[in-house]
Amino acid sequence: MRLPTAAQPPLRHLLRAALAGLIALGMPLLVAPTAQAHPMPHSVIALRVGDDRATARLELPLDDLTLAMGVNPLGDDEALSESEVGQVADYLGGHFDVTSPDGAGWTTTILGVEAGAAEQTDTGRYQELVVEAVLAPPVGESTRAFTVAYDAIIHQVVTHRILVTVESDWAGGQVDQTRELGVIRIDTGTGRIAPLVVDLGEGSSWTGFTAMAGLGMSHILEGTDHLLFLLVLLLPAPLLARRGRWRRPAPLRQTLRRILAITIAFTLGHSATLAIASLARLQLPTGPIEALIALSILIGAVHALRPLFPGREALIAAGFGLIHGLAFSFTLAELDLTTGQLVLSLLGFNLGIELMQLIVVALVLPPLILASRTAAFSGFRILAAGLTGVAALGWMVDRLGAPNPVAEAADAIVAYQVAVLVAIWVFGLACWLAKVTVSRTSARPRPTPARR
């Protein structure tokens, strides 16, 4: 049976329905990549936990904060006025609360608010407000267990998230890495924003001390420039200088004395300035000091090629060690420690540095001493000193404000330390075996020709 004409949908209606279906199917494909490529930034609460207080750095995306506050706290300016800082502080005062496990409230003091640019994973660049605050528990309460009740932004922007981290916890042994504590988000089922309960566990001075010793060891392993300076000074230590050139090998006892003197002098130099700069809490510019460290490596490399100060390597090591110690102090300055913690950290950090230096010297020098007794060592010394000098030049230019591929390649050496060490041992053992083989061959008695 045929339907009446009025009951049949016109062709244009069918086309519109088909087009609408295609658009409905295609929209997720068009929108999803955009959403994935530009996820919304989240807030961050980064904590530094001390003995009697914690400091917090709040990173708040400006667009979301404006939606939540109902007004742009920046106004039309790039910097915040005193009244605008007060407005942000008042807003956070109603949305940020920290309490001890027994319910005792902590005192929150806003130290400052600054605007700046930021970028999180896949978000692209955006504006944010960075708020610095001090969180102080009641007298006698521990800083190692507390509850964070926080609903800034998220009380209006329900898709927002707050990532809570600990950047530093000296007593807990966390000194060189950030640890995530949790994420504050809205429960879509109940609409509730649950507080984040934090328990950092037990902490002690011994834990902080050993963590700093480990940090000192890793600092040397990762600080390729410090190791290169020491090793490039030790490179010509097994040799004697004469008439402006490195000549024959030095006696073994003299070589060992030189190595010991250079290592101790470098230790005394950097230990002195590390202690002074850290305990006096000196604020020093990093760029010039790092550039001077690169210069010290360059001078050491030139000395390994041609003797600049033969017999006075220990004095040079002590002098340039003073500069290296200033660079070491930057690590301690970033931790915001109490005086007692700083003293223990200084001892532990320096102990770690010395232990790793001794380990590296003990691993590298035996094959170098073996090779120095052969003619092949001259080529090795020239190649090693030349490459070190090039790396030092790249670092120096980079640290003066001109990034370059040479500096990037030199920084990447740290990933191949084991391979370099194995190569040095293979070279040293090969030189020793070749020398032993030649000695044995030359020591064999020659057959006496038969008389006729």
Image (cartoon, rainbow, N blue to C red):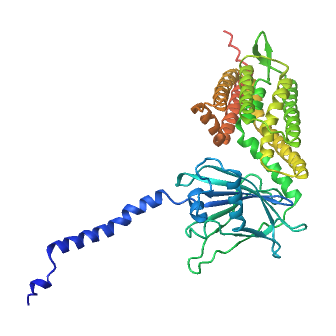
Please state which of residues 284 and 95 is positioned toward the viewer in this rendering. Answer: 95
Residue at horizontal 24 percent and vertical 73 percent from the top: 17
Residue 444 is at least partly visible in this image: no
- Residue 152: x and y in percent read 65, 66
Please state which of residues 182 and 321 is positioned toward the viewer in this rendering. Answer: 182
Residue at horizontal 80 percent and vertical 31 percent from the top: 323
Residue at horizontal 64 percent and vertical 41 percent from the top: 416
Please state which of residues 448 and 163 is positioned toward the viewer in this rendering. Answer: 163
Image position of 185 (left or right of 124)? right
Q: Residue furthest front?
A: 83
Q: Is residue 310 above or below residue 98?
A: above
Image quarter for residue 331?
top right
- Residue 370: x and y in percent read 75, 29
Residue 36 is at least partly visible in this image: yes
Quadrant where the image shows the N terminus: bottom left
Residue at horizontal 38 percent and vertical 66 percent from the top: 28
Quadrant where the image shows the C terminus: top right
Q: Is residue 393 above or below residue 413?
A: above
Image quarter for residue 216?
top right
Please state which of residues 311 and 323 is positioned toward the viewer in this rendering. Answer: 323
**Disc count in the image?**
0
- Residue 318: x and y in percent read 85, 28
Image position of 142 (left or right of 74)? right
Image quarter for residue 51?
bottom right
Q: Residue furthest bottom?
A: 1
